[in-house]
Image: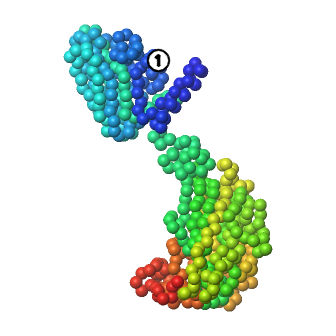
Amino acid sequence: MKYFQVVFISFFFLLANPALFSQYAVDFESGNTGYYEDLCWDIEEASVSSSQPIEGNKSIRTSKLNNDIGIIISPWILLSGSGNLTFKHRIYNYNGSRTLKVYIISETNPSGDLILDYDYSNGTTQTESISISQSGLYKFKWRFSGSGGNSRGQLDDISFPGTYASDPSNDCDPISINPDTDGDGVPDSEDDYPADQYRAYDNFYPASGQSTLAYEDLWPSSGDYDLNDVVVGYSFKIVTNASDNVVDLIGTFVLRASGAGLHNGFGFQLPDVDPTSIISTTGYDVLPSAGFTFGSNGLETGQTYATVIVFDDFFRFLVPSGGGTGVNTSAGQTPEPYDTITVTMVFMNNGTPGAGGAVSITTLNISEFNPFIIAGMVRGKEVHLPGFEPTDKADASYFGIEDDDTNPATGKYYKTAANLPWALNIYETFDYPLEEVSIIDAYLKFDEWVQSSGVQYPDWYQDNPGYRNEANIY
C-alpha cells in the first residue's frame, strides 16, 4: 500500500501539471474501478469493465438499465475557455428505452448545465465532440438511464479541453488555480519571486520614476538660496517576503547637479530601524581618507538608527569642467552626464533577519527616510529636510545661529524664522534654479507655499501658468 501511494502521488502531479499536458485524456486502460475512484472519479452503478469494451481492453460499463441509472462524474478539470470535450459511448446489448444526458457542473452549480441529451435507437458506438467555452474549474457528469430489457451504457476514450485539477490528498477538492511554486503562501500570479521562498513582493518609492532632493549648502546661512548646491534624484525598491518583512532595500541615487563651492557628501538615515537589523550594506562610495567610520554591515558607526553614507564628495563623480560654478547649474556651462550610485541593504539572508530582528515595511516607512548632505565634508555640518532631526553625528552648535531658527525643544529643525527650508524633497523630477538665483525668483508661488505651511500652492514646483520664471531655471 505504501508503494502504491508513492506511485499514485507521482502520477497525480504529472497529471495536474498544465505545463506537461494541455488536455487530460482517459481511456480506462490503466486500472480497475477503485484506481479511478482514487483519482477522484465518482462512479455509481457502473464499473471499469473488460466485457465487450468500446475500444482497447476496457471501458466503463453501467449496471443493467432496467428502470435504473448509471452515473460517471469526472474529477475537477481546469478548463482553458476553448476546445472540445470528446468521448465515445454506446448501449451494449441494445433493447428498451435508453438515454444519455451529459452535464457540466461547477462548485456554484452542482446540478450542472445540460450539454448533451441523446436518445439511443441502436447499439452502434457514437463519437461526440462538444464545444466547451467555459474557463476555470468544472466537472463533467454522464447519466445513463433506461427502462425495460437488460442493456447497459458504455463510456470510453474521453478527452477534456483542460488539465486534471483534483487533489486526491485533500478529499478530491480542486487544486488552486494559482499555484504557489515556492510554497511561501503567495500565489505565483501575485509573487514577484515565484521561485524564491524568501522573497515575494517588489515595492517602489516613488511609485514610478524618481523623486528629487535639492539642498542649499551654506547653512546655517541662507546664502544665495538657489537650492542647487546638491541635486540628487532617488528611488527605492523594497523587496519584502510573504509576511511583509523587508528582505532587501535598493536605493538608486542619480547625481544631477551641484552649484556649490564646497565639496559635499550625502547620506540618509532610516528612523526607527536598529543598525543591527541590517546584515550588510554595499554600493556606497566613500574614500577611506574622508574620515567616516563604518561597521561590518557597512553602516556608519555611532548612530542610534541605521545610517548610510552614500558618497563623500559630489565632485568626485561630476567634475566641474569650467565656466560658472560647480556643475550643471550655470547657463552656457558644458553639461556633464549624470552619475548613478546604487546602494543595497540586506535585512534578511535566506529567511534569517539581522540580530536586531525583522523589520516590517510599515516600520521601515520609506517615505519618511531622512536624507541629508554633509556640507564642506565637515562631518558635523549636516543639512536635513525641514522638520527632520539630525543624526547623532551632527554638531548642535550650528543650531540657532545666523539664519537658522532650529529649536529642538519645539521640534523645529532646519528652518529660518520665516520657515524657509534648506532642503526640498520633490516627489518627481525637479527643474532647479540657475546658480545664484534664489528659488523665490525662479518659482513664483514658492514663498506663498512656505508661508502657508504647505496649504497654498502645494504644486508650486510644477510648470503651471504663472508659476515659473523660466529665465531663472536651469
Residue 34 appears in the figure: no
Q: Foreground: 29 or 330?
A: 330
Disc 1 packing (10 Å; few <14; some 14–19; many ≥20): few
Question: Which residue in the structure is indicated by mark 1?
Answer: 31
Q: In this picture, is 326 found above or below 43?
A: below
Residue 437 location in percent, x, y?
55, 89
Residue at left 55%, top 24%? Answer: 7
Q: Foreground: 141 or 3?
A: 3
Residue 29 occupies quadrant: top left
Q: In this picture, is 362 found above or below 473?
A: above
> In the rendered view, does 120 fall on the left or right side of 343?
left
Q: In this picture, is 327 found above or below 289?
A: below
Residue at left 69%, top 72%? Answer: 311
Q: In this picture, is 378 found above or below 355?
A: below
Q: How is the image coloured?
A: rainbow
Quarter of the image that includes the N terminus: top right
Residue 251 appears in the figure: yes
> In the rendered view, does 313 fall on the left or right side of 168?
right
Residue 351 location in percent, x, y?
66, 49
The residue type indicated by label 1 comes to: Gly
Residue at left 63%, top 55%? Answer: 247
- Secondary structure type for disc 1: loop
Residue 301 location in percent, x, y?
77, 67
> In the rendered view, does 178 fall on the left or right side of 43?
right
